Amino acid sequence: MTRTLALLAAGAAALVAVSPAPAPAQLAGNVFIHDPSTVTESDGKWFTFGTRGGGLISDDGWTWRGGAERPGGGVAPDIIHIGDRYYVAYAVGGGGMSGGHASQVKIMWTKSLDPQSRDFGYHDVGVVAASDGVENQDAIDPAFLYVDGRLWLSYGTYFGSIRIIELDPKTGLRVAGNQPVDIAIDMEATALMHRDGWYYLLGTHGTCCDGPNSTYNIRVGRSRNVLGPYVDAMGQPLLKGGGKLVAGAYGRVQGPGHFGLIDLGGDTQKFSMHYESDLDRGGRSVLAIEPLLWRDGWPVAGSNVRAGDYEIQSERSGNALQLKVDFVRIPFDVRASFMAKPTDPTSPLPDQRLADVEGQWPAGATRVELAAHMNRPNQRWTVTPMPDKGGWFGAPYYRIGITGTQRVLATTPAGEVEAAPGYTGADAQLWRIDQLTDGSYRITPKVRAKGQDSALMAIGTSTVSLAAFDPRSDAGRWRFQMP
């Protein structure tokens, strides 16, 4: 939440009056929210809460609906799950509303986030931080971090400093005698992460609450000590306004803010946030989930696979996924190639076309394999997002087919993989494509045996199969290369 919170409140009625536009391939359903808390699992569902109370629920991280309940109102909550409790932090007051910066950060807890659960029910813990409206600090935008049995909370906005305090993970109360430490300026909507001995402080720079004119962007610094000092990749201290870019505007969405880490295991990390403006949804603020990558020890936003034509390359061998068919030579004059004089004229050879070879391919289901990339039609794949077929955690399911044909990658009833002769829209012909933290992708069938974490795997240099994904191996990692 921000110094321009008043703009948000003043425009709320106008936003409600805007009818929703058709959902693009970046989450489906009801995704309208501002200042979302970190997306968190409870009772097999996923939850996030926003400013002014209430929130969203999803069964798969793709299609969202209203119904999450959070009492207390206030702004910019965050959630963390410790033991059998879900702690929720939120702020009341501040944010520049009516010109004021007097605010309180409050904590409450429940044993379930699901209003339908018998364990649902909030209990107040109390106030853990406050600002008096006079000091150079605004106690809003809280965010949790739990590391090595210790619970930390960052908070603050552009009005003064970002601060950190320690809480008791057993009660949610502030540790007795603990004093706040200033760790950054010129940011708000902070988040904390811990990885490989580093503490990361992420914060939102820029302005909010102005729709497509919002300049929000997410930046980061790191420290070996949770209390700082935090510096960015150029050594600029966050206490002097530094910060390395993690996520900014792209395409038809602007103003990313309120980072929340979602660690899904298997080397798959994503992050929740909101975009201040989605032009395809009337410029409204929307929930978003994006892949998170790590490069040279720094987090950076990844990207879902875009619609297009690709070579699908195995990270393990570098070989390309292809339809298993007979190799067809491209005609050329061997003598001219090896015996021509340097001064002899040349003319371009055309690429091998689909029409040149498709008639020789089997009519039915065909095996797939790996081989050296030769830029041949049986190695060209068209990847098409299919958002109407659902999705999983920020990405729709995809159709993967041989370019220019109806042949599609599919699973068989026996749990193998093949190229089916025609697309039917069946679940066996749909795939999850998740970007992993190193930038490669995991390809997972929508149809999986119950409890089986299978993925498309390179077995050796030529064989392709479905098998258990191992994040320690390159066998299940793929690259999508433009031809």
Image (spheres, rainbow, N blue to C red):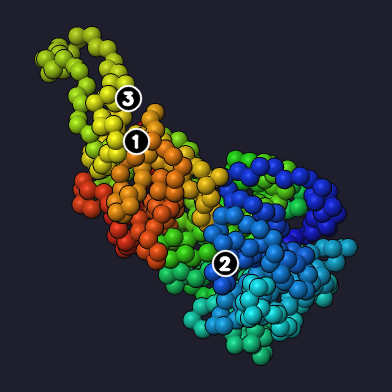
Measuring from the top left, give residue 444's x and y in whole percent: 39, 53
SS category of the residue bearing label 1: loop
SS category of the residue bearing label 2: strand
At 37% from the left edge and 39% from the top edge, which residue is drawn?
A: 408
**Disc 1 + disc 3, Cβ < 8 Å:** no
Residue 232, picture quadrant = bottom right
Q: Which mark is residue 45?
A: 2
Which part of the image, by quadrant, shows the N terminus? bottom right
Q: Nearer the viewer, residue 362 or 272?
A: 362
Name the residue tied to disc 3: 354
Give the alpha-carbon distance from disc 1 to disc 3, as whole Å.
15 Å
Circle 2: residue type = Lys
- Relative to residue 208, is residue 429 drawn left or right? left
At 66% from the left edge and 78% from the top edge, which residue is drawn?
A: 120
Give the alpha-carbon distance from disc 1 to disc 2, as whole Å.
36 Å
Asked if one can make out residue 331 in the rendered structure from this viewpoint, the answer is: yes
- What is the crowding at mark 3: few (fewer than 14 residues within 10 Å), some, or many (at least 20)? some
At 25% from the left edge and 32% from the top edge, which residue is drawn?
A: 362
Name the residue tied to disc 1: 421
Check the image and report above or below for 343 versus 58: above
Circle 1: residue type = Pro
Residue 62, picture quadrant = bottom right
Measuring from the top left, give residue 461's x and y in whole percent: 20, 48
Earlier residue among tags 3 and 2? 2
- Front of the two marks 1 and 3: 1
Asked if one can make out residue 295 in the rendered structure from this viewpoint, the answer is: no
- Relative to residue 23, is residue 101 drawn left or right? right
Q: Nearer the viewer, residue 256 or 447?
A: 447
SS category of the residue bearing label 3: helix
